[in-house]
Amino acid sequence: MSRLYLVTGGAGYIGSHVVVALLARGDRVVVFDNLQQGHREAVHPDATLVVGELGDVGALRHLFGRHRFDGILHFAANSLVGESMQQPFRYVGDNVTNALNLVRTAVEHDVRRLVLSSTCAIFGLPERVPIDEDVPPNPANPYGESKLIIERILRWADEVHGLRSAALRYFNAAGAHPEFPIGEDHAPETHLIPICFEVVLGQRPFVEVYGDDYPTADGTCVRDYIHVCDLADAHLRVLGAIDDGSCRYNVGIGRGYSVREVLDAVRRVTGHPLPARIGERRPGDPPVLIADPSRIRGELGWQPRIAELDEMVATAWRWRAAHPQGFARRQQAS
Ligand SMILES: NC(=O)c1ccc[n+]([C@@H]2O[C@H](COP(=O)([O-])OP(=O)(O)OC[C@H]3O[C@@H](n4cnc5c(N)ncnc54)[C@H](O)[C@@H]3O)[C@@H](O)[C@H]2O)c1
């Protein structure tokens, strides 16, 4: 049965991929995005794009008055960890207030399903790795704190108002859609793989590696990279299960790659020597973040289809090589 979903932040990197996945299985989609980080061209033409701001409760009420949503996927957020350390109140304030606006409006309009883009940043320096859902959250930055507060708000929205929710704690999203022309394009870019591509494309002189003296095999930080289409699949599966009760899942592939391994993968895929320099550690960067995805595998039958780093990088590179300036600058040029 075709359902209508509201996707906040659906013009952004992960949201735009989930929109494509929802449409592909026959659902209908309204994207709500202020286009601050998102891109109009990233929104599939079969989705309805409403340009708006989550801080504007009137706009949300108008939106919910016009559409009867079967569920909400909430991607829209400020999500730069470093920036959150400089502007903590903006991060906690905006992310939490905007989520509250959305949840309140959903409750007012009797919408009963919400999937939250949460993050492994809620764990801070985790007590153990790989990180399962029982590891106590302990955010090390205001960005992670804001997502944890939203998870807690959602608990009460369920208990008091019956709004079922799923918090998906993403690890590092990577890659691009293999068929539909969308990919990762943030300004400023803070994610390693697209930064590497900027070097390959001559837009940056080198990749800065933030520290090589961590207690890891090669001294650089280790992260769990998950292909964005596998992440999209996790959303589709959780939407099918959410009516049985609110839930939370750590979503990664359960395997880590070091910064050096990522650089080598980009070199193999692009054939570029990719100069790199070792810089200072970034404050608060945990040495290793790897998910334990046993729960989502066991309960939802989720499996990553693209688990090899080279393949993730190759899908990302295919899009970026075809759009060297990304979305926004390509738009300006045309
Ligand atoms: N990219 C990752 O690896 C990663 C990892 C963990 C969690 N997350 C979370 O996943 C979500 C999506 O991440 P992404 O990388 O696609 O980010 P993104 O910045 O590409 O997408 C976010 C979208 O939300 C929109 N937006 C932001 N604030 C808004 C507001 N107030 N009103 C309306 N629209 C607004 C932006 O314009 C953008 O299109 C975020 O919530 C992020 O915290 C991402």
Image (spheres, rainbow, N blue to C red):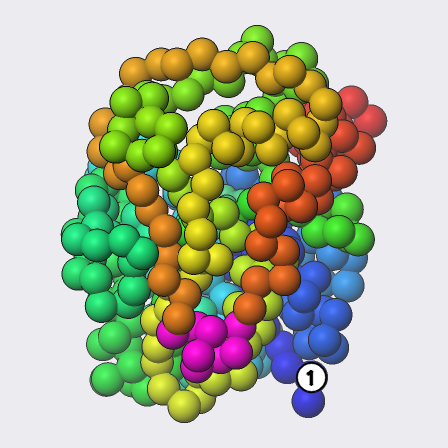
| Residue 21: % across, % down | 67, 66
Q: Does residue 1 appear left or right of residue 53 in this picture?
A: right
Q: Does residue 218 appear left or right of residue 184 in this picture?
A: left
- Identify the residue at horizontal 57%, vertical 28% (top origin): 264
Quick check: is 210 in the magenta stretch?
A: no
Indicate whether 327 appears above or below 120.
above
Please identify the residue farthest to the right as the structure is shown. 334
Residue 237 is drawn in which quadrant?
bottom right
Please tell me whether the stretch drawn in magenta is mainly helix, strand or loop. helix
- Identify the residue at horizontal 60%, vertical 33% (top origin): 265
Camera-nearest residue between 200 and 11: 200
| Residue 103: % across, % down | 36, 69
Asked if residue 96 shows in the view, the reply is no
Q: Does residue 133 appear left or right of residue 274 in this picture?
A: left
- Identify the residue at horizontal 39%, vertical 71% (top origin): 294
Q: Amino acid at mark 1?
A: Ser
Magenta segment: 295-302
Quick one: label 1, few (<14), some, or many (20+) residues within 10 Å?
few
Label 1, on which residue? Answer: 2
| Residue 202: % across, % down | 67, 13
Indicate whether 276 appears above or below 163.
above
Residue 85 is drawn in which quadrant?
top left
Indicate whether 247 appears above or below 223.
below
